[in-house]
Image: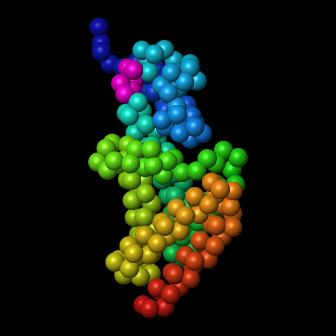
Amino acid sequence: MSSAPSPERPAKRRHIVEIAYRLFKRAGFHATGIDRIIAEADVAKMTMYRNFPSKEQLIVEVLEYRARRFGDQLDRLTDAPGSPEQKIDAIFDWYRRWFLRPDFHGCLFAHALAEYAEPGTPIFEAAAKQKADLRRRMADILAVKVPAREAESLAGVMLMLIEGATLMAEMGQGEEAIRSAGKAAAVLIAAAGDRH
């Protein structure tokens, strides 16, 4: 008898991840119990534990799932023709649109960092990796215009602007915050370009 996974297993695993993502996004990680995920996903407890022996493993996979989706969206934005300024502006505009969505509940990665604040743990590392990836992507865009070291520094500031605007969006002030953040980013990029 073969021990190969059945074809339904990847689909079932993805279904659990998608349900857990929706629940974690709305209620948080600690507040969402495994039993609730099992009930909402309509899977047997054994199926859950066969796919995810621990809640920590499920959270890490949910974060990786969300990071892949976001990365794919960023790729589409940044692969389009345009100047570095236009590409950074497109990223800020993506955030503006996200803030206006009815299912906006803040940043899943920031929430993970807040709930699992110990560096070196798998959940912390998965969340921190997504933030580092966004910064790297912006640095790569900016490196077309300014030296790599300055691009890194500028990308760090862009990330802080985005994170601040995301927090303001959780307080109902997202549109104004991201507009101001985008303007500040444009000024910083122009000033950096003028120096080179």
Compared to 190, does 98 lie above or below? above
Where residue 53 sits, quadrant-wise, is top left
Residue 56 pos. (x, y %): 38, 34
Compared to 61, does 84 lie above or below? below
Can residue 101 be seen here?
Answer: yes
Question: Which one is nearer the viewer's eye here, 107 or 43?
Answer: 107
Please say whether residue 55 is one of the residues in the magenta stretch: no
Residue 173 pos. (x, y %): 68, 61
Residue 10 pos. (x, y %): 44, 27
Task: Identify the residue at image location x=42%, y=15%.
Answer: 46
Answer left or right for 40 relative to 195: right
Answer left or right for 127 relative to 66: left
Residue range in magenta is: 49-54
Compared to 30, does 104 lie above or below? below
Which quarter of the rendering shows the N terminus? Answer: top left
Question: Which one is nearer the viewer's eye here, 73 or 38?
Answer: 38
Please say whether residue 51 is one of the residues in the magenta stretch: yes
Where residue 27 sits, quadrant-wise, is top right
Question: Which one is nearer the viewer's eye here, 166 or 69?
Answer: 166
